[in-house]
Amino acid sequence: MMKRKTYYNVLRAAKLIRAKGYDEQTSYQIALQCFDNMEQSKNGMSVEWWIDKIVRA
């Protein structure tokens, strides 16, 4: 489970987002936004939960 915004975790998150049909650059931007959302919300939800909420491209 990914928890912190590390380089490796952002790469893994971007890969999950690309699987939804997004291009490489957009997937990195969305991945960073997911980590920011996770950190700001403090609702205890994982970054995977945030990624799951992304609509397929």
Image (tube, helix red, strand yellow):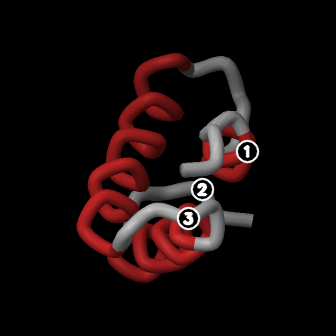
Q: Quadrant of residue 25?
A: bottom left
Type of amino acid under label 2 = Lys
- Residue carrying label 1: 52
The image shows residue 24 at horizontal and vertical percentages of 33, 74
Which is more foreground, mark 2 or mark 3? 3
Task: Assign a secondary structure to mark 1.
Answer: helix
Disc 2/disc 1 C-alpha distance (Å):
15 Å
**Residue at the image point whose x is 46% and y is 69% from the top:** 14
Query: Is 37 left, or right, of 20 in this rendering?
Result: left
Q: Give the tally of numbered discs.
A: 3
Q: Quadrant of residue 5?
A: bottom left
The image shows residue 44 at horizontal and vertical percentages of 71, 28
Of the image marks 3 and 1, the number of the one nearer the N terminus: 3
Q: Quadrant of residue 53?
A: top right
Judging depth in this view, the residue of 11 and 5 nearest the camera is 11
Of the image marks 2 and 3, the number of the one nearer the N terminus: 2
Task: Assign a secondary structure to mark 2.
Answer: loop
Type of amino acid under label 3 = Gly
Judging depth in this view, the residue of 45 and 50 nearest the camera is 50
- Residue carrying label 2: 3
Judging depth in this view, the residue of 39 and 22 nearest the camera is 22
- Residue carrying label 3: 21
The image shows residue 19 at horizontal and vertical percentages of 63, 72
Query: Is 49 left, or right, of 37 in this rendering?
Result: right
Q: Quadrant of the N terminus?
A: bottom right
